[in-house]
Image: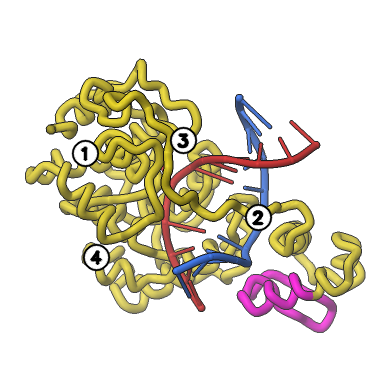
Chain colours: A yellow, B blue, C red
DNA sequence: AAGACGTGGCA
DNA sequence: TTGCCAAGTCT
């Protein structure tokens, strides 16, 4: 069953005009966008990405800045360790790859913060190479359209890559288009909560639809723990203070963000361990 | 190999 | 209001 052709036609007609899809956006821009998009919605990424690339147009530009600048520019995208890793990746690209984003999958995979998904996304979208690209959208679309299940089971890199490989055309351009189209379908049509099957270009061949939308029976992924009152919450509050100040934030000021001394200290210590905060003479700052 | 890791929008 | 979810990675 060929789903690549109808998906490609649909994508060419209705795919969103996103910055990183514009011709000539560049491998560095695509790499930065992919890292920002890890667990963060498109709408929140777009303005931050534009600022980031205007300020640091090349990996060497970012590498020459203090990591704390990257963390501050990251703003509230969330998971600020990504900013630190992106800075470290820029350093590695500058020092080990002559300042040029590598094209090879293994070289990409070796960069900090670049995992199985992002490495393939960069190789496929920035360089046009033929690799199956599998993210949460792709998993969901393939689970439904091909496997006839309402939700993907637990991620299995091997199985997931094989599944995507099986729908990928041989032709390079067609393969790249298919990768983008399956992701896009999962993002805007075949969504997690309320899929818009009426607007789906492959509804006529979807096995889940054909089976009458059977409810998912497998094991569910572990539920996200409550955020309110969690260590993540406290880390976030402390990071907001550090981002907002150009001078060291005192222990007294940090004490105001969270009353529980033990939990606050645990959060601060973990931020220091992560390299997101640095103790100084007068308090704490983003990494210099 | 589960669990940690931010943040905010939406139903 | 609470819970789910958003182009994952790392340990």
Quadrant holding the N terminus of chain A: top left
Q: What subunit carries mark 4?
A: A
Seen from the viewer's position, the closer of residues A109 and A24 is A109
Residue topped by disc 3: A192
Q: Which tag, 4 or 1, sits closer to the chain's start? A: 4
Residue sitting at 52 percent across and 62 percent down?
A: A82
Q: Which residue is mark 4?
A: A105
Residue matched to label 1: A178
Q: Nearer the viewer, residue A198 or A111?
A: A198
| Residue A286, magenta (yes or no) | yes
A120 up-or-down from A64: above or below: above
Secondary structure beneath dot 2 equals loop
Rounded to the nearest angstrom, the CA distance separating label 1 from label 2 is 35 Å
Q: Residues within 10 Å of mark 1 (few under 14, many from 20)?
A: many
Q: Position of residue A58 (x, y in %)?
A: 39, 60
Residue furthest to the left in view is A170
């Amino acid at each position: 069953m060929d789903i690549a052709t109808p998906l490609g036609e649909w994508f060419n007609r209705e795919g969103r005009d996103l910055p990183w899809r514009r011709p000539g956006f560049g491998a560095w821009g695509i790499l930065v966008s992919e890292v920002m998009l890890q667990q963060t919605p498109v709408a929140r990424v777009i303005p931050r990405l534009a600022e980031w690339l205007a300020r640091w147009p090349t990996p060497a530009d970012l590498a020459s800045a203090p990591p704390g600048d990257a963390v501050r520019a990251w703003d509230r995208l969330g998971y600020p360790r990504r900013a630190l890793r992106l800075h470290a990746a820029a350093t590695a690209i500058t020092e080990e790859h002559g300042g040029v984003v590598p094209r090879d999958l293994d070289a990409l995979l070796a960069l900090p913060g670049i995992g199985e998904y992002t490495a393939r996304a960069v190789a496929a979208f920035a360089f046009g190479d033929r690799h199956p690209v599998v993210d949460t959208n792709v998993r969901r679309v393939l689970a439904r359209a091909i496997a006839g299940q309402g939700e993907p089971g637990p991620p299995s890199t091997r199985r997931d890559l094989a599944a995507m490989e099986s729908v990928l055309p041989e032709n390079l351009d067609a393969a790249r288009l298919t990768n983008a189209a399956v992701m896009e379908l999962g993002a805007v049509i075949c969504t997690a909560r309320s899929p818009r099957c009426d607007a789906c270009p492959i509804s006529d061949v979807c096995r889940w639809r054909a089976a009458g939308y059977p409810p998912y029976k497998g094991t569910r992924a572990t539920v996200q723990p409550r955020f309110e009152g969690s260590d993540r919450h406290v880390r976030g509050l402390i990071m907001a203070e550090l981002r907002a100040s150009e001078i060291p934030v005192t222990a007294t000021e940090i004490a105001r963000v969270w009353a529980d001394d033990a939990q606050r200290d645990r959060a601060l210590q973990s931020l220091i361990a992560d390299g997101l905060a640095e103790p100084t003479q007068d308090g704490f700052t983003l990494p210099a």
